[in-house]
Image: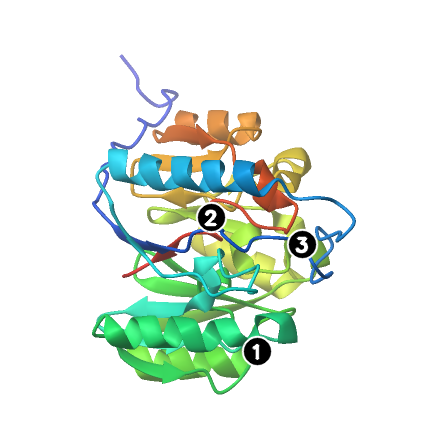
Amino acid sequence: MSTAFLPAPTPVRTATPRRYLMCPPTSFAVTYTGNPWMDPSTPVDRDLALHQWQVLRDTYRALGHRVATIDPVADLPDMVFAANGGFVRDGRAVAARFRNPQRAAEADAYAAWYAAAGYATVAAEAPFEGEGDLLVVGDVVLAGHGFRTDPRAHRQVAEVTGAEIVSLELVDPRYYHLDVALCPLGDTIAYLPAAFADAARAELEGRYPDAIEVTEEDAAWLALNALCDGLHVVLPVQAETFAAQVAAAGFQPVPVDVSEFRKSGGGVKCMTAELH
């Protein structure tokens, strides 16, 4: 019997225990307009936000991951987005340098936490928003620029950590960070092609021919602001098509409701820094 036309087998996926850093949303609010999602006239339900954050934290723990927490600093409403605080790899950390003055003090808080945790920590020398714009995919680090992070910071991270950096230009202000335009899935990715400049899109197409392309509707729910441990993909409950796509690729979708944080343009990954 010929097998020429049989579909390729679905890859076997395996979860790997991870260590994450999170910050409780005790000061979370939308007080200024830092991206197209933010509208200070839209109220935030802080009790609901805290509940959603706790469910996300508990979901990670139930999946076998360790979660460290950093103490929130009063009057820093965006500090809950721990992924933006820096980038950690192999015992070294590069702490953020925020473009928005409302977030500037977060950089010192995260740098202090990294140093206290034993990481050799340096401050970014150019605008840099951590894992918001740096995502590990296999042996490389995809690095976004165009809105929040300066490409000079990519070079600094490469020098400090020894990582291979692939710079990608973002062009849609709604997807102002790489982690709202692309999600690592093991050795491949899911992404929204329209969020990238032509050269960046061609780079991704060449590297990841099996990438999942999300729908515009799911992208608007910040579906790509998700987190994969090799098997499980923790993603927004509203992103039903994306959940079906990752399931068809052999992953297990784990839907959570983080809708309060979408009011600030954030979601699952924004609230989660991975301590690589």
Q: Which residue is mark 3?
A: 30
- The amino acid sitting under disc 2 is Cys
Q: Residue furthest top?
A: 1
Residue shown at 32% from the left, 71% from the top: 113
Q: Secondary structure at mark 2?
A: strand
Q: Earlier in the sequence, mark 1 or mark 3?
A: 3
Q: Can residue 122 be seen from the camera position used here?
A: yes
Q: CA distance from mark 2 to mark 3?
A: 25 Å
Against 10, is 158 above or below? below
Marks 2 and 1 close (CB-CB < 8 Å): no
Q: CA distance from mark 2 to mark 1?
A: 20 Å
Q: Secondary structure at mark 3?
A: loop
Q: Position of residue 145 (x, y in %)?
A: 58, 70
Marks 1 and 3 close (CB-CB < 8 Å): no
Q: Can residue 162 be seen from the camera position used here?
A: no
Q: Position of residue 151 (x, y in %)?
A: 54, 78
- The amino acid sitting under disc 3 is Val
Specify the label residue 183 is tagged with: 2
Q: CA distance from mark 1 to mark 3?
A: 25 Å
Q: Residues within 10 Å of mark 3 (few under 14, many from 20)?
A: many
Q: Position of residue 187 (x, y in %)?
A: 34, 49
Q: Earlier in the sequence, mark 2 or mark 3?
A: 3
Q: Which residue is mark 1?
A: 150
Q: Secondary structure at mark 1?
A: loop
Compared across the picture, whether 74 is left or right of 260 comes to left
